[in-house]
Image (tube, rainbow, N blue to C red):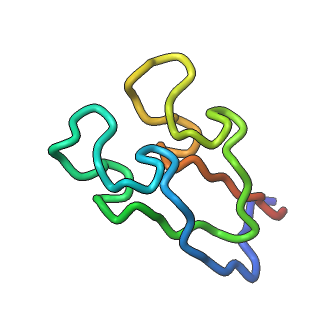
Amino acid sequence: MSNAYLNISYSPETCGWCNGTGEDSGAHDRPCRICDGEGSILVAQPANNCAWCDGNGADRIESGKPCRACDGSGWAHSLIG
């Protein structure tokens, strides 16, 4: 059986890559590459901190790059199925 998302609701959560500032963490004159300068992203609820980056949005192996597991958002959610 493939993974399915059932009864998912989304809520805005603080972007883990820019910590809600909306600025790119590498260059403060550009908008955040993850939230596009909004400072928050919509996350499927219930939301959990990403286990790979501990919710900070940064890759553990390649510094300066977004987390490969959560795409830099800092958030993960459970799959059903």
Vertical relation: 50 (above or below) 61: below
Q: Position of residue 28 (x, y in %)?
A: 22, 41
Horizontal and vertical percent for residue 54?
67, 36
- For the point 52% across and 40% down, which residue is it? 57
* Residue found 73% across the figure and 54% down from its top: 48
x, y percent for residue 46 = 76, 68
Q: Judge by depth and name the residue closer to the eye, 81 or 8.
A: 8
In this image, 57 relative to 9: left or right? left
Residue at image location 40% in from the left, 29% down from the top: 65
Q: Residue at x 45, y 44 (%)?
A: 17
Q: Is residue 16 left or right of residue 3?
A: left
Quarter holding the C terminus? bottom right
Question: Where 65 sits versus 36, above or below?
Answer: above
Horizontal side, residue 15 vs residue 65: left or right: right
Position in image of residue 42 (x %, y %): 52, 70
Locate the N terminus by quadrant: bottom right
- Quadrant of the image occupied by residue 21: bottom left
